[in-house]
Image (cartoon, rainbow, N blue to C red):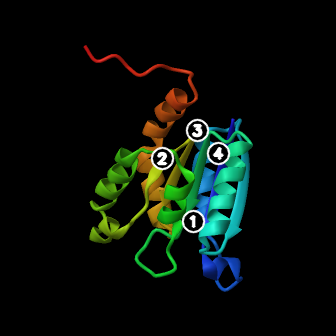
Amino acid sequence: MLLGVLTVSDRCSQGLACDTAGPAVLALLRKQWPLAQFKTALVPDDEEEIIAHFRKWSDDGAALIVSAGGTGMSPRDRTPEATRRAIDREAPGLAEAMRSKGSMSTPFAWLSRGIAGLRGNTLIVNLPGSRRGAEDSLASILELLVHGLEVAGGVQDHPRID
């Protein structure tokens, strides 16, 4: 299985700050999927660069792409907009679950504009750019991602509801 972690940050990409969110996300994903292969990258808050990575990694067969950063209220935070342009279908419950769980620790979780959706069989999920926000958000949906990837990849049908 191929998984991608894309850190989106002007400051980190310019060497003005150290990326802590991307490595934290990578560590959680490696723990969940120890046999997976990973692609990682660090890009500035540029919609076209974000989209290019989403499309390339999806075309390369990534089952999951997780972005960290660019989901806030700053004028340069454009990750959700890039994601909407890259995906075919949204999966709004994932972002809602992350914000709901995050709000138990901080009300600022409600300000995250991250989204999730599918580009073909590739699930793309936006996480906040802070290490704690990224870790907490990913941890809150990890079980959902396991099942979601099985269904999106055609490994398992939707569960029956009788």
Give whichever of discs 1 and 4 has the lower sequence position. Answer: 1
Name the one closer to the observer, 34 or 162.
Answer: 162
Q: Viewed as shown, does residue 110 lie left or right of 5?
A: left
Q: Amino acid at mark 2?
A: Gly
Task: Report, in whole angstroms, how far the alpha carbon at label 4 lies from the one at label 2.
Answer: 21 Å
Separation of marks 2 and 3 at Cα, in angstroms? 10 Å
Q: Mark 1 and mark 3: span between their CA atoms?
A: 26 Å
Q: Nearer the viewer, residue 103 or 74?
A: 74
Q: CA distance from mark 1 to mark 4?
A: 14 Å
Viewer-side residue, 136 vs 72: 72
Q: Could you tell me which residue is drawn at 62 percent across and 82 percent down?
A: 11
Residue to which mark 4 is pinned: 30
Q: Is residue 53 left or right of residue 148?
A: right
Q: Which residue occupies the foreground of this view, 109 or 27?
A: 109
Label 3 secondary element: loop
Would you say the residues marked 1 and 3 are in contact, meaning their CB atoms lie under 8 Å apart? no
Q: Which mark is residue 21?
A: 1
Reading the chain from its start, which is encountered first: label 4 or label 2? 4
